[in-house]
Image: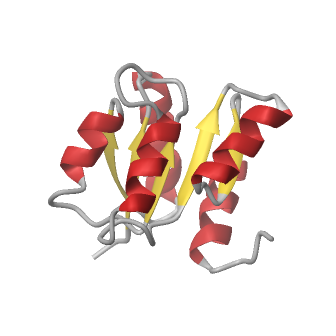
Amino acid sequence: MLPTVLAVDDEVAVLRLIRQALKRAGYEVITARDGKEALALLERERPVLIISDVLMPGIGGLELVRLLKERKETRDIPVIMLTSLTQFRDMQRGYEFGALLYLTKPFTVEALQQAVADVLSGKDFE
């Protein structure tokens, strides 16, 4: 069974690109269009990693990460933020909320695959 990654983004094209990139790298990918849908998926799925946009309708990425880190069942799932917010303060907030990595859009398939591999290999990002 392949390791599962949850991708959360309100843009279908971005979800499609993440799915294609990570399937080629040997991962199963499940998707959600916002934080609420992601939380519902996490009731029955246990991904090894979550990749989330920040700006989404309803429960956005930062709120999603905050909620994940509050729950015993999900607090240890690493999160990569993948967003168009590029300001230092935005990145800082992502890390403060509990994201392990912060990637900005546009992104390359190779950069995404490397980030996922680094996170799942236990690379130290401190």
Q: Residue furthest front?
A: 70
Furthest-right residue in this view: 88
Q: Position of residue 96 (x, y in %)?
A: 67, 51
- The quarter of the picture where the C terminus appears is bottom right
In the visual, does 45 lie left or right of 8? Answer: left
Which picture quadrant has residue 106? Answer: top right
Residue at (77%, 69%) from the top-left corner? 125
Residue beneath the point at 27% across and 47% down: 39
The spot of residue 31 in percent (x, y) is 32, 42
Quadrant of res 121: bottom right
Query: Horizontal placement of 100 versus 125: left or right?
Result: left
Figure check: 119 above or below 69: below
Q: Quarter of the image containing the N terminus? A: bottom left
User: Which of the two residues, 98 or 33, is positioned nearer the viewer here?
Assistant: 98
What's the residue at 45%, 72% (across, down)? 76
Regarding residue 100, the answer to whether it shows in the image is: yes
Q: Is residue 92 left or right of residue 33?
A: right
Q: Nearer the viewer, residue 17 or 11?
A: 11
Vertical relation: 6 (above or below) 47: above
Residue closer to the observer: 23 or 84: 84
**Image coordinates for residue 33, horizontal then vertical, percent:** 33, 30
Residue 108 in sight here:
no
Q: Position of residue 119 (x, y in %)?
A: 62, 69
Please report the residue visible at 69 percent of the width from the left and 61 percent of the height from the top: 114
Of 109 and 121, which appears nearest the observer?
121
In the image, residue 40 sits, relative to residue 83, either above or below, namely: below
For the rendered model, the colour scheme is: secondary structure
- Describe residue 49's horizontal placement relative to residue 98 as left or right: left
Count of numbered circles in the view:
0
